Every structure is written in C-alpha cells, then in structure tokens.
Amino acid sequence: MISDQEFNKVCRLAKLSIPEKNREQFLNKLNSIFGWIDQLKMIDTTSVDNTTFDCMTSTTERTDTPHMDNTRNELLSNTKNKKFDMFCVPKIVE
C-alpha cells in the first residue's frame, strides 16, 4: 500500500495537480492497482516456458551494404519547395 506521503511525492514527480477533494479517490484506486500487482507476483510461473522470442529465431538476414537508390534530382523532383538543391522547410524556431 502506498502512503499519503509517497502519493504526494509521485504526484510532484509526475507534475500532477490533483484537487484535494479527489486525492482520497485517486489514492484508493492506486492502492487497488498495487493490490492487483501483488496478486500477480504470487503466481508461480516457474513451469512456464519463455516463448517471447520464438518467432524471431528464424529471421533472415541481409547484407548491410550501402547503396543509393535515388539521385538528388529524382528526390527533389517531388517538391516545389527547393533551393540550392535542398528541401526548404518552414522555420520552426524563432
């Protein structure tokens, strides 16, 4: 169970502003979630095989060789906004 002090610390770290009238409700919900987690921790999974990445055992690998598929002119032909053989984009930072 999470204490009121720990709840305040989590709210501060997460930058959450929870109204005082709703704090008890949120604290109860959070404690019920932690209760479910404690129940899951009690499940014995030692006899369960780990099959998370079984589908990844037969992946095909390709050679990692650099190559150019398109020329600069082919790529720039798809835009109206170009200048000095480069894409022009809107200014983001003022």
Image (spheres, rainbow, N blue to C red):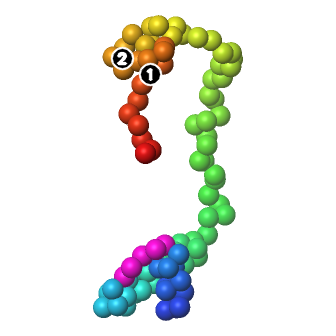
Give, as a three-letter code, the residue at label 2.
Answer: Thr
At 33% from the left and 16% from the top, the residue drawn is: 80
At 37% from the left and 82% from the top, the residue drawn is: 18
Give, as a three-letter code, the residue at label 1.
Answer: Phe
The image position of residue 52, as x and y in percent, is: 59, 47
Where disc 2 sits, the SS reads: loop
The answer to whether residue 63 shows anywhere in this view is yes
Is the residue 52 above or below the residue 18 in the image? above
Mark 2: give few (<14), some (14-19) or many (20+) Cα within 10 Å. Answer: few
Quarter placement of the C terminus: top left
Is the residue 75 above or below the residue 35 in the image? above
Q: Residue furthest left?
A: 21
Classify residue 66 by image quadrant: top right
Q: Is residue 94 magenta?
A: no
Mark 1 sits on what residue?
Answer: 87
Mark 2 sits on what residue?
Answer: 79
The answer to whether mark 2 and mark 1 are in CB contact below 8 A is: yes
Is the residue 9 above or below the residue 88 in the image? below
The answer to whether residue 35 shows anywhere in this view is no
Q: Is residue 79 left or right of residue 13?
A: left
Classify residue 20 by image quadrant: bottom left
Secondary structure mainly formed by the magenta segment = loop
The foreground one among 69 and 64 is 69
Mark toward the start of the polypeptide (2 vs 1):
2
Give the magenta range: 14-18
At 46% from the left and 74% from the top, the residue drawn is: 15
